[in-house]
Image (spheres, rainbow, N blue to C red):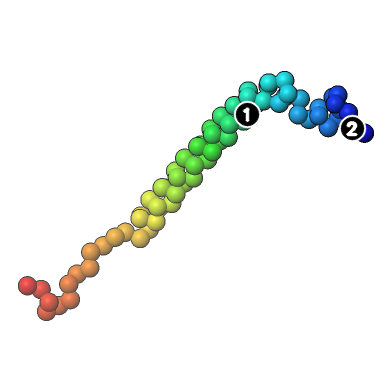
Amino acid sequence: MASFGASDETALYRPVLNGDAMSDNLTFGLTLTIVGMSGTLLSLWALSLLTSLLKKIFPLTREKPAPGTEK
């Protein structure tokens, strides 16, 4: 049934119609930014710990020159 009044279908979009969409979008955007940044920093921290651990397990050593090739 086509009508131009509020129905159950348009009730889902009521914040958009009332102008509350900006605050909802801002809240969602800030939340997503904070969660995304903290997730990124947490994963970088974990990777740096893994890198440090691998450096301690497998230290970098210089190769000695083969005998007879020294100058």
Q: Earlier in the sequence, mark 1 or mark 2?
A: 2
Residue furthest out toward the bottom: 68
Which quadrant is home to the N terminus? top right
Which residue type carries mark 2? Ala
Residue bearing the label numbered 2 = 2
Q: Name which residue lies at 56% across and 29% down.
A: 30
Instruction: Classify residue 25 as left or right of residue 12.
Output: left
Please tell me whether mark 1 or mark 2 is closer to you in this view.
Answer: 2
Callout 1 secondary element: helix
Q: Position of residue 45 (x, y in %)?
A: 44, 43
Q: Name which residue lies at 49% across and 42% down.
A: 40
Q: Tag on residue 4?
A: none
The crowding category of the residue bearing disc 1, from other C-alpha atoms within 10 Å (few below 14, some 14 to 19, many at least 20), is: few
Q: Position of residue 20 (x, y in %)?
A: 68, 21
Q: Name which residue lies at 12% across and 77% down.
A: 69
Q: CA distance from mark 1 to mark 2?
A: 30 Å
In the image, residue 47 sits, relative to residue 62, either above or below, namely: above
Residue 23's quadrant in the figure? top right
Q: Name which residue lies at 54% across and 34% down.
A: 33
In the image, residue 43 sits, relative to residue 4, either above or below, namely: below
Q: Position of residue 54 (x, y in %)?
A: 39, 56
Which residue type carries mark 1? Asn
Check if mark 1's residue and mark 2's residue have beta carbons within 8 Å: no
Residue bearing the label numbered 1 = 25
